Amino acid sequence: MLLQASQIVGLPVGATDTQSRVGTVSRVIVDPDSGQLLGFGVKTGFLGGEKVLSFHDVTAIDHAAVLVRDPEHILPAQEVAPIKKALAERRQLVGQRVVTEG
């Protein structure tokens, strides 16, 4: 399935283990050197702030939602070194195409 980053931002993030919504995708994060998709920024609540979800922890993504098995995989960016590095470089992906398997 081919999705643009702008189609992913704003999608709900759901946990398959609890069948609940755990946040909303706030940004798409890529490695600034390789262009590889690293993960997503996730807004976790009204006052929860932004955390990150590594692409390796995503179980499914489509036009309706991003799914993760366990919401404990949504972490502060400082705890995920490749994402921390990419965010420090402040490159944007909105408007670019993202290819997923599906």
Image (cartoon, grey):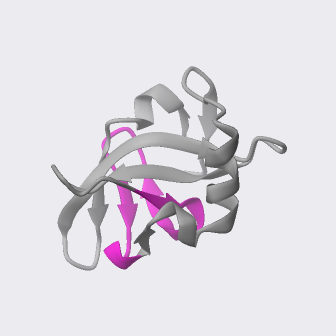
Q: Vertically, is 74 above or below 100?
A: below
The magenta-colored residue range is 51-72
Q: Position of residue 6 (x, y in %)?
A: 46, 26
Q: Position of residue 23 (x, y in %)?
A: 26, 55
Who is closer to the viewer here, 55 or 85?
85
Q: Vertically, is 99 above or below 97?
A: below
Q: Vertically, is 6 above or below 45?
A: above
Image quadrant occupied by the N terminus: top right
Q: Is residue 47 visible?
A: yes
Which residue is located at x 62 percent, y 25 percent? 96
**Residue 71 magenta:** yes
Who is closer to the viewer here, 98 or 42?
42
Q: Residue furthest top?
A: 95
Number of labelled discs?
A: 0
Q: Is residue 70 visible?
A: no
Q: Position of residue 51 (x, y in %)?
A: 40, 58
Who is closer to the viewer here, 86 or 9?
86
Which residue is located at x 43 percent, y 74 percent? 73
Q: Position of residue 3 (x, y in %)?
A: 52, 33
Which residue is located at x 20 percent, y 77 percent? 18
**Residue 4 magenta:** no
Judged left or right of residue 72, residue 37 is right
Which residue is located at x 61 percent, y 29 percent? 92
Judged left or right of residue 42, residue 97 is right
Q: Residue furthest right?
A: 33
